[in-house]
Image (cartoon, rainbow, N blue to C red):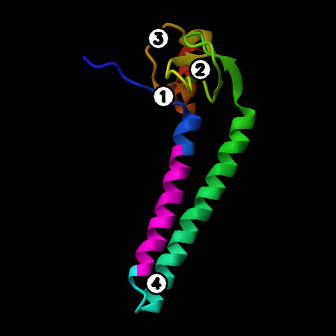
Amino acid sequence: MSQLVYSSKINKIRSFALILIFAGILLMYVGLIFKSREWLMVIFFIFGLLAIFASLIVYLWIGTLSLRAVPIICPSCEKPTKMLGRVDACMHCKQPLTLDKDLEGMEFDEKYNKRKYAKQKNQSTD
């Protein structure tokens, strides 16, 4: 059986923003195909610019999130990394990480970061 590989939340969001940039540039190149129909070319250019502006917004958002992330040293690779939420993965070696003592030793699952899970956990302990 293959081992699951996890990815850091910060890296996932940065990858999404990079894909938006490439999609925007690709849309503008497709717009060049329609030089004879200016209105269609302008539409593709506008969609391309919107994708690039959306990428800018995502990069600004992840930058502010990254400033609030908890900086830690990965126990596996001993490199500095940042954690968002209760569980995350190392940016370098993809090692699952948690700072929550209740989750230590448990199977890594992204659901631990959701408020619904924390709410259910609090209700079960009451």
The residue drawn where x is 51% and y is 72% is 47
- Which of marks 4 and 2 precedes in the sequence? 4
- Which of marks 1 and 4 precedes in the sequence? 4
Relative to 17, say whether 43 is above or below: below
Q: Is residue 42 magenta?
A: no
Secondary structure beneath dot 1 equals helix
Residue 41 disc label:
4
Residue farthest along the top direction in this orientation: 105
Please give the residue where the numbered disc 3 appears in the rendered image.
106
Q: Position of residue 16 (x, y in %)?
A: 51, 48
Q: Main secondary structure of the magenta part?
A: helix
The kind of residue tagged 1 is: Glu
Residue range (magenta): 15-32
Q: Quadrant of the C terminus?
A: top right
Of 21 and 119, nearer the camera is: 21
Q: CA distance from mark 4 to mark 3?
A: 53 Å
Q: Is residue 25 magenta?
A: yes
Of 71 and 104, nearer the camera is: 71
- Which of marks 1 and 2 precedes in the sequence? 1
Secondary structure beneath dot 3 equals loop
Q: CA distance from mark 2 to mark 4?
A: 55 Å
Q: Residues within 10 Å of mark 1 (few under 14, many from 20)?
A: few
* Of the two numbered discs 3 and 2 in the rendering, the one whose residue sits closer to the viewer: 3
